[in-house]
């Protein structure tokens, strides 16, 4: 599914973090130019659960922001599930602000899983870089 998404999204990049070449993945982040390329979408920031206490998410986020800036970005946007208060606060501590925009949760998309909750949505966060 990820390979398909990358192939279908020109300009998108999947950055990976490893301890060394050939070592297991520690984390990943998706970057995708939006519109004129001044804004980039950041998604799927993921760190292996068993090593989340090493602050690798912070490092990966910083590296992704630097990568996007070098590619011409002046702004990063992302969506976060609205009920994830602690995750939203984590991004806010790193300079992201809520835009006030809310997007619907794609309940009909079975590729992302099935949820028993029907009160989900996405909030949009943004940061100038």
Image (cartoon, rainbow, N blue to C red):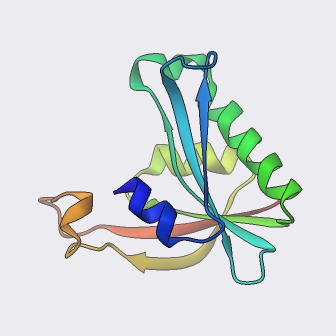
Vertical order, 82 against 36 (above or below)? above
Query: Does any portion of residue 82 appear in the rendered image?
Result: no
Vertical order, 48 against 96 (above or below)? above
Position of the C terminus, as image quadrant, is bottom right
Q: Residue furthest bottom?
A: 35
Numbered disc total: 0
Of 113 and 67, which appears nearest the observer? 67
Vertical order, 76 against 109 (above or below)? above
Query: In this image, 52 relative to 78: left or right?
Result: left
Q: Give x and y (percent) for residue 14.
A: 58, 49
Instruction: State the residue at coordinates (55%, 19%).
Output: 22
Instruction: State the residue at coordinates (46%, 50%).
Output: 85
Of 64 and 125, which appears nearest the observer? 64
Query: Does any portion of residue 98 appear in the rendered image?
Result: yes
Instruction: State the residue at coordinates (42%, 55%).
Output: 3
Q: Give x and y (percent) for residue 104.
A: 36, 78
Query: In this image, 115 relative to 81: left or right?
Result: left
Position of the N terminus, as image quadrant, is bottom left
Q: Give x and y (percent) for residue 115.
A: 16, 59
Instruction: State the residue at coordinates (83%, 60%).
Output: 71
Of 95 and 43, which appears nearest the observer? 43
Of 74 and 98, which appears nearest the observer? 74
Q: Quadrant of residue 81?
A: bottom left
Q: Residue furthest left?
A: 116
């Amino acid at each position: 599914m990820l390979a398909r998404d990358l192939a279908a999204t020109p300009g998108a990049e999947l950055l990976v973090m490893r301890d060394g070449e050939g070592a297991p993945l520690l984390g990943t982040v998706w970057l995708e130019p939006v519109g004129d390329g001044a804004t980039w979408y950041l998604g799927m920031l993921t760190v292996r659960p068993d090593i989340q206490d090493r602050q690798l998410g912070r490092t990966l986020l910083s590296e992704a922001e630097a990568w996007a800036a070098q590619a011409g970005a002046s702004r990063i946007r992302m969506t976060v599930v609205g009920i994830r208060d602690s995750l939203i606060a984590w991004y806010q501590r790193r300079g992201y602000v809520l835009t006030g925009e809310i997007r619907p949760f794609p309940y009909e998309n079975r590729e992302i899983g099935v949820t028993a909750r029907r009160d989900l949505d996405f909030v949009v966060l943004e940061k100038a870089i």
